[in-house]
Image: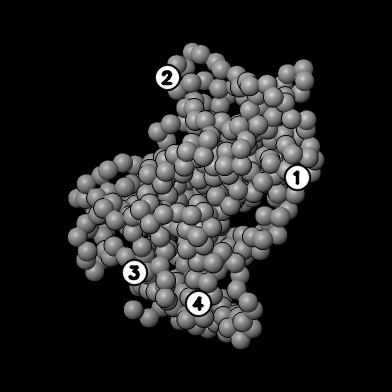
Amino acid sequence: MTPQSTDDIYDCVIVGGGPAGATSAHDLAKTGHRVLLLDKAGRIKPCGGAIPPRLIEDFDIPESIIVARARAARMIAPSGRVVDMPVEGGAVGMVDREHFDEWLRARAAKAGCERRAGSFTGIEREADGLANIVYKPKDDSSETIRIRTRTVIGADGAKSRVAAEAIPGGGETKCVFAYHEIIKSPTPTEGFDPARCDIYYQGRLSPDFYAWVFPHGETTSVGVGSANKGFSLRDAIRTLRKDIGLDQAQLVRKEGAPIPLKPLKRWDNGRDVILAGDAAGVVAPASGEGIYYAMLGGREAATAIRELIETGDVTALAATRKRYMKAHGQVFMILGIMQHFWYRSDKRREGFVAMCNDKDVQRLTWDAYLNKRLGKPDHMAHLRIFLKDTAHLLGLAPARPKQT
């Protein structure tokens, strides 16, 4: 790809200003590229807001952005029994997406990225092959603006319009629909701990996923996800809030959005477009965790775009997915199998929570989550987990965990 000096041509236009897009914009702008970040202003994604230490370290997140730290997770089974999973020697950072995402966008702008608010409508091609990003400004829906660019990063969410238009098979991934209500955090009680994330594996709250209560300091996210279109997410949250005594808590805001369940088979068009974040489908199955994977995808996309601009080698785009999945594909596969099996009925959810009471499971789970890698093989621990898992599957172990 031959560099051009024409002032009206951007090196890259990034569609979508969430963690993936904002990270791409920051990384490219920091290395001297002319970048434009196009985002729908005012949109906030429903999210528990948990970020592991690995993210905080890798992406230089300051302490001021972290609104709370969770030192344990509580798993609640259909029977109401609980299992507490303390984070031994550490904690999980908690952020509020309203402020976290905007901080990421502002950091990108400080690095030199240009920001615009608007809605992407399409990609057009000029005679020289360059792409025109077409969008409508937020303040004037009747106006259409075109931006010339050498490359494009689609980071516009699970139902990505960039993916649907530019990538074969794009925009067609299966999703969980998430909904949460941000409320004013109540006074700590036995049922609410500002340093603990509560996760409800109960079919009445979600027939195929889970519900959550994640503290954010002064506020708390109470949410639920499900791929069942006939299931009322709002009713589930109403039930959960009433059950745990949060029905009178002041509502701050509410949001809903689809969350992808599986990475797309292709992230690029073999020419000048690449996907990142939810648009590429990189959300961890079973847990729904997406912030770290989105930001990593945004960084990898920026790396590919830099290589493409500098060398003209379009294979840099396809290599991004291969490299990413080599590092994290095994985790996605294991979590996908776990979700498919354990979330299918309350009987299995009861067994799943019982498994979480096992110290080997807790240790390996936290190591994988906090460090974003599968730990060194612990063959005896894996054997113990396998035997216990088999006992649950065959009904040879008690389904209900001990009260903690």
Q: Nearer the viewer, residue 341 or 127?
A: 127
Classify mark 4: helix, strand or loop.
Answer: helix
Spatial separation of the CA atoms under disc 4 and disc 3: 23 Å
Compare marks 4 and 3 and give the one earlier in the sequence: 3
Compare marks 1 and 3 and give the one earlier in the sequence: 3
Of circles 1 and 4, which is in front? Answer: 1
Residue 134, given in percent of the width and then of the height, sits at: 60, 21
| Residues at marks 1 and 3 touching, judged by CB atoms closer than 8 Å | no
| Residues at marks 4 and 3 touching, judged by CB atoms closer than 8 Å | no
Q: Could you classify mark 2 by the number of other residues whose Cα lies within 10 Å: few (under 14), some (14-19), or many (20 or more)?
A: few
| Residues at marks 3 and 2 touching, judged by CB atoms closer than 8 Å | no
Quarter of the image with the N terminus is: top right
Question: What's the residue type where badge 4 is placed?
Answer: Arg
Question: What's the residue type where badge 3 is placed?
Answer: Gly
Of circles 3 and 2, which is in front? Answer: 2
338 displayed left or right of 6: left
The residue singled out by tag 4 in the image is 363
Q: Residue at x 44, y 39 (%)?
A: 106
Spatial separation of the CA atoms under disc 1 and disc 2: 37 Å
Q: Residue at x 73, y 18 (%)?
A: 126
Question: What's the residue type where badge 2 is placed?
Answer: Asp
Of circles 1 and 2, which is in front? Answer: 1
The residue singled out by tag 1 in the image is 316
3 displayed left or right of 333: right
Compare marks 3 and 2 and give the one earlier in the sequence: 3
User: Disc number at residue 80?
Assistant: 3
Compare marks 2 and 4 and give the one earlier in the sequence: 2
Question: What's the residue type where badge 1 is placed?
Answer: Ala
Asked whether the viewer can see residue 169, the reply is no
Spatial separation of the CA atoms under disc 1 and disc 3: 50 Å
